[in-house]
Amino acid sequence: MDIQNFMIKIYLIFAIGLCSLFLSGQQIYYSPPVRIPVSLSGSFAELRSNHFHSGIDIKTQGTINIPVCAVADGYISRISVSPTGFGNAIYIDHDNGTTSVYGHLNQFRPDIQKYVKDIQYQRKSFQVDIPVLPGIFPVSKNEIFALSGNSGSSAGPHLHFELRNTKTEDPINPLKLGFQIKDKTPPAIFALQIVPLSESSHVNYTSSKVIYDVEMVNGEYHLKNNPVIPVYGEIGFAVETYDFVDGSQNKCGIISMELNIDRVIYSSIKLNRFSFSESGTVNSYIDYAEFMKSGRRFQRTWVEPCNSFSGFDFTEKNGIFDPGIDAVHEVSIEIKDSYENTSVLKFTVAGKYREMQTKVSESEAFFQCDHTNQWKTDDFRIELPKNALFRDLPFQYKTSETKNGFYSPVHEIHDNTVPLKKNVKIAVKTFDLPEMLQQKVLLVSINPETGKYTSVGGKYENGWDTAEIKAFGNYAVRVDTVPPTILPLSIDNKNTLTEPDKIRFEIRDDLAGIDSIEGLIDGKWALFEYDAKNNLITHYFDAKRFELGKQHNFKLTVTDFTGNSSVYEATFRK
């Protein structure tokens, strides 16, 4: 690592000239975190799986090791290293009450890297989350402190950048605070969805939601063929829309949406700031059922009863519209990005009544979204905390036959098209479980189409397996007795190193998941960097901690979450 750190220092010295030249004479508080042209692959509040995106993703020209600079004077207040999430991340507090966050880094500056590595060895843990006192790492605006990377859950090389309110930790849209990118491209609108919201409501004489294709004519968005849509009762509108920045095909997120009906504002949403505690409300902001079915995200102009997202503002009944009978209404939905580029969809609805056949669906219980809800059978229990649901739910449940290798029936818990805002606790009774396997029990989620299953963990006690689930669906009890696999990538079958500066292994576990990794060189704990998305662990030889130039005894133990362990041992000379 000494040679590697030395090369990094040389690279940083060369790159620092770029930082000193950029933005000289500018008066804005923040400078960009990179000194290459800033182009985005992801925007603030962009719709992601189960959350709003809390920052912006900056392209790094498809590579790693782009110098990353402090956007303003401040001090490093937190350093995080994780095999998932932001991976290698640094947090800098600034005197204006904001914190800047830099994620998916490849390496920190050498002095910061040493500081982190010392703590990792003290704690005997690769994953660390370190609060840092103000005087340890002060930084100046434009000062390089790291190199960009692809660590954590990153899907490709880029820099994840955030601004947060230091006190509340709420993410703030950086593009509203002086971070300029070239963008004169307005959002694109692809489709409109109109949804009946009461038992008697209908759209185009059907009680189901209807999707209409959208086209642009003479610079304006309209529905194809400009229909006058017959509607009745309480209805809601939603649009499939994305933003694009100049010169990029990446789908980004919009920042605001406003619903006008007959020139009256019914609802508006603004996404320039939110709290992490409400990020999961994205699953109520979109039509979650449609997303689960088709992968399309329709953004709603109305809010469900137990969606408390603070970005909504309403003048009329939470954005829900009742057209009356025989009245014609002009509707427009105005959509903007961070730079006020604007697109507007205009269409017409007319109040038309037709008696509809009421659908009656059987249910086991009725769950109220603003209450704690509990329900049980002889071999199943479920408990939903208050506000776990976005709307009241006629709860459905059934079981199907036990399959080979399972120790419970398959519990079909409602269906996965209904989103949850909070985790739900379930308990499943086990059957015919041998005592010797009780410590190997886990709950699995089963894909009803493929039959494949994934672990959700759980705790076994007195014949029951209890776990928290994040989604409705099919669940059953299995056991995991298979240890993880270890494949050496740097040591051949003659115990000879094939890489001079490191040893690497591919590790996998097919069900419970990797819980712990312990590498020992001559009986001493050795740091292995863990890249979970690629199932790789890597140890870089460190002459300051281990005597090199000799024969070494090596032992690697990898353990999963049900306690199954695999051990790899070797001797090598280094």
Image (cartoon, helix red, strand yellow):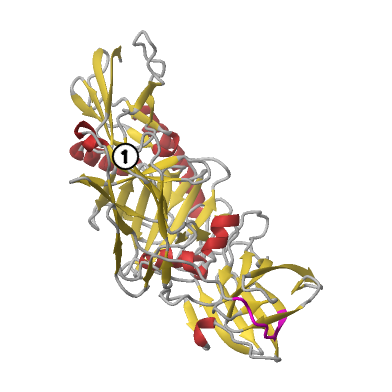
* Left or right position of 460 against 234: left
Relative image position of residue 367 (x, y in whole percent): 37, 70
Name the residue at 37% across, 61% down.
73
**Residue 291 is drawn in which quadrant?**
bottom right
Relative image position of residue 106 (x, y in whole percent): 42, 41
Name the residue at 54% across, 40% down.
63
Mark 1 highlights which residue? Answer: 407
Determine if the magenta segment contains residue 354. Answer: yes
Q: Quadrant of the N terminus?
A: top left
Relative image position of residue 304 (x, y in whole percent): 47, 75
Q: Which one is nearer the viewer's eye here, 98 or 333? A: 333
Query: Which secondary structure, mark 1?
Result: loop
Q: Which one is nearer the viewer's eye here, 26 or 172? A: 172
Q: Which one is nearer the viewer's eye here, 176 or 144? A: 176
* Left or right position of 130 against 85: left
Determine if the magenta segment contains residue 34. Answer: no
